[in-house]
Image (cartoon, rainbow, N blue to C red):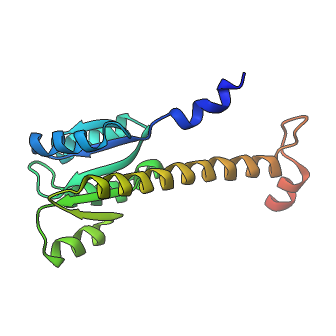
Amino acid sequence: MGDDNNAGPEVLARVLVVDDSTVIRKAIEKKLKNHFELRMAADGEAGWAALLEDDRVSVLVTDIEMPVLDGYGLICRIRAADDARIRNIPIIAVTGAEDEESRERAFACGATDFIVKPIDAMQLRARVHAQARFSQTSARLTRTEEALRDQATLDPLTHLCSRRYFEQHC
């Protein structure tokens, strides 16, 4: 009985890591595996496919320079998605390029955060954790908003539209 209340916090946020380098994916996995549930993809197209099929991904960490679909293209595709869950996912762009142009372009495409390689483990965990909490809080807010909207427009006894609904729509 008391275990139900503890079930929520034990669920680890799922993070999708998209990078063409096996070495970098393994390094990120090593830094995050004890704190998050991880899913890996080797390029932007595989990352996009993973986002479409996995509705539990709450944060995306993506490299910028990749074959097939680069990080900029992936970020732009995500921000243009019809599905709000995908469109609003926090995105942390990771790249070895230290120039201001790469950073500006990533943010212009819709990146939420930006990290330059080599990746500091504490910094990466802190940023992913902050974005995961933001993502989870946003999802809870959306569910609460929908529930309140339903309560305001549906009669709780009959589950028919309420007088308030008819006044708003007539």
- Using the image as rendered, state which of residue 8 and residue 154 is in the foreground: 8
Q: Is residue 35 above or below residue 83?
A: above
| Residue reaching furthest to the top | 1
**Residue 146, horizontal then vertical, whole percent:** 68, 49
| Residue reaching furthest to the front | 122
- At 16% from the left and 77% from the top, the residue drawn is 101
Is any part of residue 111 visible from this angle?
no
- At 59% from the left and 30% from the top, the residue drawn is 7
Position of the C terminus by quadrant: bottom right
Is any part of residue 108 visible from this angle?
yes
Give the image quarter of residue 88.
bottom left
Q: Left or right of 152: which side holds 64?
A: left
**Residue 130, horizontal then vertical, whole percent:** 44, 56
Q: Is residue 33 above or below residue 135?
A: above
**Residue 24, horizontal then vertical, whole percent:** 14, 46
Q: Left or right of 134: which side holds 96?
A: left
- Using the image as rendered, state which of residue 96 and residue 49 is in the foreground: 96
- At 24% from the left and 63% from the top, the residue drawn is 115
| Residue reaching furthest to the bottom | 100
Give the image quarter of residue 27.
top left
- At 31% from the left and 54% from the top, the residue drawn is 122
Q: Is residue 16 above or below residue 80?
A: above
Give the image quarter of residue 100.
bottom left
- Using the image as rendered, state which of residue 139 and residue 98 is in the foreground: 98
Q: Left or right of 94: which side holds 154?
A: right
Q: Is residue 137 above or below residue 11?
A: below
**Residue 78, horizontal then vertical, whole percent:** 33, 54
- Using the image as rendered, state which of residue 51 and residue 18 is in the foreground: 18
Q: How many marks?
A: 0
